[in-house]
Amino acid sequence: MKLVTACAAILFCLCVVHVRDWVDEFHYRFPLYITRRIARDWDTFHTAALYRGFRRNELEVVFRQAGFANTTWIFPTESGLYQPILTAQTDMSNLK
Protein backbone atom coordinates (compact mmCIF):
# COMPACT_ATOMS: atom_id res chain seq x y z
CA MET A 1 0.00 0.00 0.00
CA LYS A 2 1.37 3.39 -0.98
CA LEU A 3 0.95 6.21 1.54
CA VAL A 4 0.41 9.70 0.17
CA THR A 5 -0.05 12.71 2.40
CA ALA A 6 -0.92 16.16 1.15
CA CYS A 7 -1.11 19.67 2.49
CA ALA A 8 -2.67 22.73 0.91
CA ALA A 9 -2.87 26.33 2.02
CA ILE A 10 -4.59 29.28 0.39
CA LEU A 11 -3.33 32.66 1.50
CA PHE A 12 -4.56 35.80 -0.21
CA CYS A 13 -3.95 35.07 -3.90
CA LEU A 14 -1.48 32.26 -3.35
CA CYS A 15 -2.17 28.53 -3.22
CA VAL A 16 0.54 26.10 -2.09
CA VAL A 17 0.12 22.33 -2.34
CA HIS A 18 2.70 19.71 -1.47
CA VAL A 19 2.48 15.94 -1.40
CA ARG A 20 4.60 13.31 0.31
CA ASP A 21 4.52 10.30 -1.97
CA TRP A 22 6.39 7.54 -0.09
CA VAL A 23 8.59 5.45 -2.40
CA ASP A 24 9.76 3.02 0.30
CA GLU A 25 10.25 2.95 4.07
CA PHE A 26 12.73 5.86 4.06
CA HIS A 27 12.32 7.85 0.82
CA TYR A 28 9.55 10.03 -0.51
CA ARG A 29 8.95 12.27 -3.49
CA PHE A 30 7.97 15.80 -2.63
CA PRO A 31 6.17 17.56 -5.49
CA LEU A 32 5.43 21.21 -4.75
CA TYR A 33 2.86 23.31 -6.60
CA ILE A 34 2.58 27.06 -6.11
CA THR A 35 -0.17 28.98 -7.86
CA ARG A 36 -0.33 32.73 -7.47
CA ARG A 37 -2.28 35.56 -8.92
CA ILE A 38 -0.28 38.19 -10.74
CA ALA A 39 -2.36 41.14 -11.87
CA ARG A 40 -5.34 39.44 -13.58
CA ASP A 41 -3.54 36.22 -14.47
CA TRP A 42 -2.65 33.07 -12.56
CA ASP A 43 0.87 31.63 -12.63
CA THR A 44 1.73 28.06 -11.54
CA PHE A 45 5.16 26.86 -10.50
CA HIS A 46 6.00 23.18 -9.98
CA THR A 47 9.10 21.45 -8.69
CA ALA A 48 9.81 18.07 -7.17
CA ALA A 49 12.56 16.42 -5.17
CA LEU A 50 13.37 13.08 -3.59
CA TYR A 51 13.84 13.24 0.19
CA ARG A 52 14.90 10.78 2.85
CA GLY A 53 12.81 10.60 5.98
CA PHE A 54 14.56 10.00 9.32
CA ARG A 55 13.25 8.29 12.42
CA ARG A 56 13.61 10.18 15.69
CA ASN A 57 16.35 7.89 17.02
CA GLU A 58 18.31 8.28 13.75
CA LEU A 59 18.19 12.09 14.01
CA GLU A 60 19.36 11.96 17.63
CA VAL A 61 22.39 9.88 16.58
CA VAL A 62 23.23 12.33 13.77
CA PHE A 63 22.96 15.29 16.18
CA ARG A 64 25.19 13.57 18.78
CA GLN A 65 27.78 12.74 16.11
CA ALA A 66 27.76 16.43 15.11
CA GLY A 67 28.59 17.44 18.70
CA PHE A 68 25.14 18.25 20.06
CA ALA A 69 23.93 17.08 23.47
CA ASN A 70 20.75 17.16 25.58
CA THR A 71 18.44 16.36 22.69
CA THR A 72 14.78 16.88 23.52
CA TRP A 73 11.67 16.34 21.42
CA ILE A 74 8.76 18.77 21.55
CA PHE A 75 5.64 17.12 20.16
CA PRO A 76 2.65 18.78 18.44
CA THR A 77 0.50 18.44 21.57
CA GLU A 78 2.99 20.73 23.36
CA SER A 79 4.01 23.09 20.56
CA GLY A 80 0.78 23.32 18.60
CA LEU A 81 2.79 22.86 15.40
CA TYR A 82 2.32 20.12 12.83
CA GLN A 83 5.73 18.41 13.11
CA PRO A 84 7.75 17.36 16.17
CA ILE A 85 10.67 19.68 16.96
CA LEU A 86 14.12 18.45 17.99
CA THR A 87 16.09 20.76 20.27
CA ALA A 88 19.73 20.24 21.27
CA GLN A 89 22.64 22.10 22.82
CA THR A 90 26.24 22.55 21.77
CA ASP A 91 29.31 24.22 23.22
CA MET A 92 29.61 27.44 21.20
CA SER A 93 33.09 28.23 22.56
CA ASN A 94 34.67 25.74 20.11
CA LEU A 95 33.17 27.46 17.05
CA LYS A 96 35.27 29.92 15.05
Image: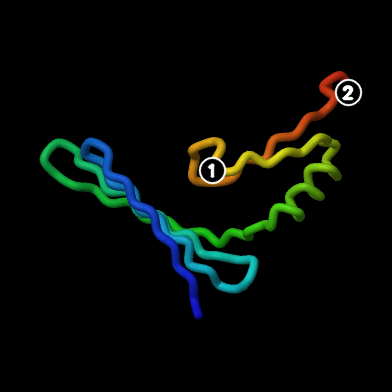
Q: Distance of mark 1 from mark 2, alpha carbons?
A: 33 Å
Badge 2 is on which residue? Answer: 94
Q: Mark 1, mark 2: which one is toward the viewer?
A: 1
**Left or right of residue 68, residue 5 in this image:** left
Q: Nearer the viewer, residue 3 or 14?
A: 3
Q: Are marks 1 and 2 in contact (CB under 8 Å)?
A: no
**Amino acid type shown at disc 1:** Pro
Q: Tell me: 66 left or right of 86.
A: right
Which residue is at the front of the view, 82 or 24?
82
- Left or right placement of residue 89 versus residue 74 in this view: right
Q: Position of residue 87 (x, y in %)?
A: 69, 35
40, 12: nearer the viewer: 12
Residue 41 location, quadrant: top left
Disc 2 residue crowd, few under 14, some 14–19, many 20+, Cα 10 Å: few
Against 48, residue 21 (above or below) is below
Q: Nearer the viewer, residue 49 or 52?
A: 52
Which residue is located at x 76 percent, y 55 percent? 58
Farthest-out residue, right: 94
Please tell me how many numbered marks the rendered image carries: 2
x and y percentages locating residue 14 in the rendered image: 26, 41
Report x, y in % for residue 39.
14, 36
Quadrant in the picture for the C terminus: top right
Is tag 1's residue or tag 2's residue first in the polypeptide sequence? 1
Given the image, on which type of amino acid does mark 2 rest?
Asn
Circle 1 residue: 76
Quarter-wise, where is residue 90 in the image?
Answer: top right
Q: From the top left corner, tell me how far across and down residue 48 is, in percent.
A: 46, 59
